[in-house]
Image (cartoon, grey):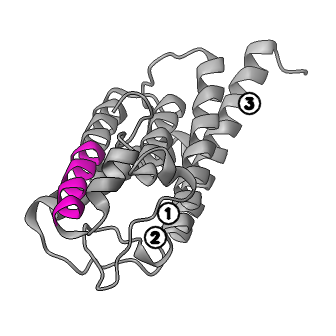
Amino acid sequence: MPLSVSGKVRLTLHALQWLTLGLWAIWLVGYWWGRLPFNRHDGLDTALILAIALGSAVIFITGVVICLEWVEITTLYLPPAVTVMGMVLVMLGIGGTVYARRCLGRFWTAEAVLQSDHQVIETGPYGYVRHPIYTAAILLNIGTLLVFATYWTLIAGVVVGTAYILKAKLEDHLLAVNLPGYPVYQTRVPYRLFPFIW
């Protein structure tokens, strides 16, 4: 018996959920491979990293439970087009984090720390915002929330987004005080995360 239109839409959305989960898994392993454990034990920075990790874990585990249908989870109703838009944001977020990290090169670390020969990087997305990895990671999380929309993933997403915003402020202060040339870079690139906004 052929599937109804609503059955086809449901099947397509479920496939998008699986694709989102698969992309997340590949990103988690590929992006973070060899970067744990962290080297620095700054209280606020460590707390923000933990908030990001725990919030992301809640979102990812919810996605696993929804995809595998282990338990019945009530999801927020979003039109199918919003789920597709979420998938696009996931891909942009993953691609953006990888590209920005590549531009940063050996200066990339999860924790806010300066290396002995640290330099200001202004290539690629760093010519538009000062923390493009966080911008892309926020897009990744917003997209995932649109694919796996529940009340607790929404709360986890707010926690993750807030932690990235605070982390950007913390790193700006650290770099402005300790990295020669960073205050000039802040003048040239006035936006932390979002061009023309903040």
Quarter of the rendering containing residue 91: top right
Closest to the observer, 191 or 134: 191
Please give the residue where the numbered disc 2 appears in the rendered image. Answer: 32
Q: Which residue is identified by label 3?
A: 12
Calculate the distance from the C-alpha at mark 3 to the C-alpha at mark 2. Answer: 30 Å
Precedes in sequence: disc 3 or disc 1: 3
Residue 158 in picture, x, y percent from top left: 29, 34
Q: Distance from label 1 to label 2 (Cα)?
A: 6 Å
Whether residues under marks 1 and 2 lie with C-beta atoms below 8 angstroms apart, the answer is: yes
- CB under 8 Å between callouts 3 and 1? no
Measuring 45% from the left and 81% from the top, which residue is drawn there?
34
- Placement of the N terminus among the 4 image quadrants: top right
Numbered disc in front, either 3 or 1: 1
The answer to whether any part of residue 159 appears in the image is yes
Q: Which residues are magenta?
A: 163-177
Q: Quadrant of the C terminus?
A: top left
The image shows residue 181 at horizontal and vertical percentages of: 31, 64
Label at residue 28: 1
The amino acid type found where label 2 is placed reads Trp
Q: Nearer the viewer, residue 18 or 173?
A: 173
- Is residue 172 rendered magenta in the image? yes
The amino acid type, in three-letter code, at marker 1 is: Leu
Examine the rendered structure and indicate whether residue 123 appears above or below residue 169.
below
- Residue occupying image coordinates x 36% and y 72%: 109
